[in-house]
Amino acid sequence: MKRIITLAMLFVFVQLNAQPSLVPQPVLVELQTGYFELSKTNTISFIGSQSEKIAQMLATKLSISTGYQFLTKEGKSGDIRFKLNTKPDEILGNEGYTLLVNSNTVEISANKPSGLFYGMQTLLQLFPAEIESNKTITAEWKIPSVKITDYPRFGWRGIMLDVSRHFFTKEEVKTHIEQLSKYKFNTFHWHLSDDNGWRVEIKSLPKLTEIGAWRVERNGQFSERANPKPGEPATYGGFYTQEDIKEIVAFANERNVTIVPEIDIPGHSMAAIAAYPELCCTKDTSIKVNPGTPFSEWYADGSFKMLIDNTLNPSDEKVYEFLDKVFTEIAALFPNEYIHVGGDECYKGYWANDPGCQALMKKMNINELEDLQTYFMNRVSNILKSKNKKMLGWDADNELTADATVMCWRGFKGAIEAAKLGHNVVMTPSLWAYLDYQQGELTIEPPVYESLRLKKCYELEPVPDGVDSKYILGGQGNLWAENVPTFRYAQYMTYPRAWSLSEVFWSPKESRNWSSFQNKLEAHFQRADIAEVNYSKAIYDPIINISKKNDKLWLEMECEAPRVDIYYTVDCTMPDIFSSKYTNAIELPDGPITLRTIAYRSGKPIGHLITLTREELEKRVRK
């Protein structure tokens, strides 16, 4: 018994004296001797009403899992103390903090309440994973003595959620914001309108939600679904009332999260046009909110053709009257400085054939349809300015206004060009930051047209070479929801890739380390399991690379997870721990073989079994 107790104490000692698994990685972590143990008699102190809200938030969080009822009190004498600096520490800025833990007290100090909030999130990560439990649980509530100094690299640390393609409830959106804030994201980009649904109540334009928020129900892959039938009821969808919006904005504000709304124009407007068909050039009253049908054709050169008119008419003054009403109400609901207006993937074929558009181009002495979009965006910018808002849009061939902030999704070239023109830039290049892309083995996960592994997310560098960093506000990950029908699946697609992006946007460039992040990751899997947050385990699946030498297939495999062994077979048997163990590149035998492979850890299978025929292996040959 004494030996068991001694081993348990040693285990706790090693845990408390190991480098804590903090995500995102703080600027400076200094481990001290000893630990702080939470008890039911502990108090939480604060000074001032701004600190009180955060102290109460911590008390509520700790009480759920521990069962203790913590007293919060004004003053400096608590066991856990929140302190706003009377003299600002210039190094910390608005969101930085210091966290000092010793055997008797925990002290979080910051210049602003946002810093106290982030210090609290780091404190919670120091506790055992059981702190994330949604019910009372028994655990040793010990944290290591440590001194942490921390502040973000970038001011814009965002995640975008598309609620047009699939609607997520008010409570789900709040839960998403809560989970993101734990990893120090401070911007929630809310994609509220598109071809597949209009999600925000505009009281002066009731048809936007009476008609635009609903579509016929369809199953199956987006872009492969059937068109609405005549008279078929539109029953799938939903929208947020203005009271819902106010509630979510207040909830986010308490967690230092700014909500940036997006109304996607002039393209991507089919839901609005279904409600008000007079807004488009064709004035087609048969247009419906799209349920995921193939309504466009894309070509190898990147150009495309819309089979249904989904674009607002830039020559119609009634369109600008419509937008003024929309943005008047949007501006009143969202107190931040930006409104995102989309601006990308605008098909101009219907403009080319419209007499009103042609007359406007002649009047303005312009020959290019792209210039007509520039005219439109300038009109929209003036509307936003009248509401004291700034324009934010996707990079779209310089069709945004000169003073717009650009969200660069097409790669680094657009960001470099935008910065050279003096635009502020938010970096969200699709190949590094699109969370709707597949994240694991292509034959296992539901099909998406592109793949994005966790490691590549982590390798994103938001400041392109040759660009003055003052123009880079930060970055964000984007979750488009065409193939994300449930909130649990939204979580699955978001995590752990969002955790890697949190470190990209928060931590110093020089302290980011993939091996270190790999080793921290599974501690956060455990926390997510306890909190009942879904996430992908694709890191455990072997990554299969095939090359060809002298007409022979060669196999190379790796895992994003550390400390795993990969076993495989090519003899029509199921692999296990007694099968061949992968160590180096393998020449595969000729013939109609099938590769089967799975990762193991500590003698137990982990991850998915992957099965690939020779035909599938041939398709993966690296050129």
Image: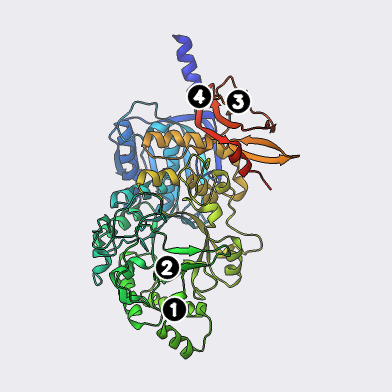
Q: Can residue 268 be seen from the camera position used here?
A: yes
Q: Nearer the viewer, mark 1 or mark 2?
A: 2
Label 1 sits on residue: 351
Label 3 sits on residue: 571
Q: Nearer the viewer, mark 4 or mark 2?
A: 2
Coloring scheme used = rainbow
Marks 3 and 2, how far apart at CA: 49 Å
Marks 1 and 3, how far apart at CA: 60 Å
Give x and y (percent) for residue 562.
Answer: 58, 32
Label 2 sits on residue: 307
Marks 1 and 2, how far apart at CA: 14 Å
Label 4 sits on residue: 13
Identify the mark nearer the N-term, 3 or 2: 2
Labelled disc at residue 108: none
Q: Quadrant of the N terminus?
A: top left
Marks 4 and 2, how far apart at CA: 65 Å
Marks 1 and 4, how far apart at CA: 70 Å
* In this picture, residue 604 sits left or right of residue 45: right
Identify the mark nearer the N-term, 1 or 2: 2
